[in-house]
Image (cartoon, grey):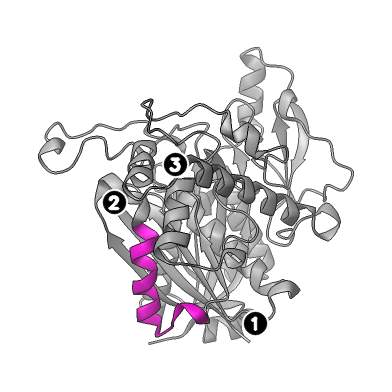
Amino acid sequence: MKEVFVVEAARTAVARAGKQSWFTNVRADDLSAIVIKDLRRRIGLGEDKEKQKIVGDVYWAATANAFKEQGGNIGRNAWLLSGGSYDVPGMTVDRFCASSLSALVTCHATMAAGWSGDVSIAGGAQHMTHIPMGAGADPNPDRAKYYDPMSPMMGWTAEQVARKFNISREAQDQFAYESHMKCAKAQDANGGLGKTKDVIVPIKCKVPAKSFRASEIAPEALYTAPESLAKKRVEDGITDDVEMVVWQDQGLRRDTTIEGLAQMPTVFMQDDKATVTAGNSSQINDAAAGLVLATAEGCKALGLKPKMKLISSAVVGVDPTIMGIGPAVAIPLALKRAGLTPDQIGLWEVNEAFASQAYYCCFEALKLPKDRVNVWGSGISIGHPLACTGARIATDITALFADPDYSEVEYIVESMCIGMGMGAAAVWQRVK
């Protein structure tokens, strides 16, 4: 078996999906192509088609509704749209919210087995503005024979977790508030450029006028988004879009307060036990993220030093009605496979699909140290762009390992719940 390392990582900013999304005018495949192009730049391949042939494959994720701009094998298509050599193949991976983590694991395993090249790219994208969650779904009419037909409704499952494990509205709102405060602190670091400044790719694009955000410290854009969608909006009579460099996650709500969260109405259930609101749930988002994996031979060929390596992973199944508990089951299995105990883990990146399930997994089931969980925020504050989330987290983990505040950390765990009753986890190790 070959040893496989992560040598580079990059992502777009995470835009808040909807009419005011900063990526309203950028397609999912174009976001993916920009990330892939930037990864090539970072590893020294650039536009050189001969050099690009070192890439063995592209493993890219698009979840649940891999059609329209997320369809047609986005892995292959995004590589071609990035100007990549025809010689490099690509594939698409779908495991709902763990899609891009599964892309990374699949990439790693294939390379370790010697069944791929010595350099590959893995990641994912999701555009929930253009393709809303559940779009194109066609549920099986006999599903009630096998599972509760409400199970695909993620918010409903969050309510079930809250009720089954007695996670109060107050605990959920406090968790959501703290997510935003941690994210705000992380964005304010480095003179306002943020903790993730070295992994986010600045992109110039046309954004809705209402969402325009002026910045005196915005970095220079490395790429300009294609203008086809912006031109189409002008043809449709929308003429107030303005040019902006998108370089920071859009979903942070700095003005979040406990009092404000407490006033928000419940969304998914309306009885007197309902506790899940838009405020204590993850956002819907638009983004892309990717990583470059290389064997020792690949590292040597690229002249790059490894940043981290994947030492174990796990995917588990759970009752679909309480799918949010997935991390509580997947993490212990991933640790067992790595031969590690919880006290050896320096940081925990557990996606916040909903405060109810994240709170339960982290603090009720696993008893994780609060000051070591999602230290820069997570799904509630950064966002949860479904198929992109696993790669977004892994990309940010490279930044965590590089951050002097966490120079002593050797292991970081990544985990998330997965729709229809699953959980995934991975253990990343710093390469010294």
Q: Nearer the viewer, residue 382 or 119?
A: 382
Residues under numbered marks 1 and 3 in contact, where contact means CB atoms less than 8 Å apart: no
260 lies above or below 108: above
Residue at the spot x=61%, y=48% of the render?
382
The magenta region covers 326-343
Which residue was labeled with disc 2? Answer: 421
Which residue was labeled with disc 1? Answer: 305
299 lies above or below 192: below
Indicate the quadrant containing the N terminus: top left, top right, bottom left or bottom right. Answer: bottom left
Q: Residue 281 carries which label?
A: none
155 lies left or right of 375: left
Q: Counting residues from the N terminus, which is met first, the one under dot 1 or under dot 3?
A: 3
Which residue was labeled with disc 3? Answer: 70
Q: What element carries label 1?
A: loop
Question: Per the image, is 331 magenta?
Answer: yes
Residue at the spot x=76%, y=56% of the render?
194
Q: Distance between the residues labelled 2 and 3?
A: 23 Å
317 lies above or below 136: below
**Mark 3, other Cα within 10 Å: few <14 / some 14–19 / many ≥20:** many
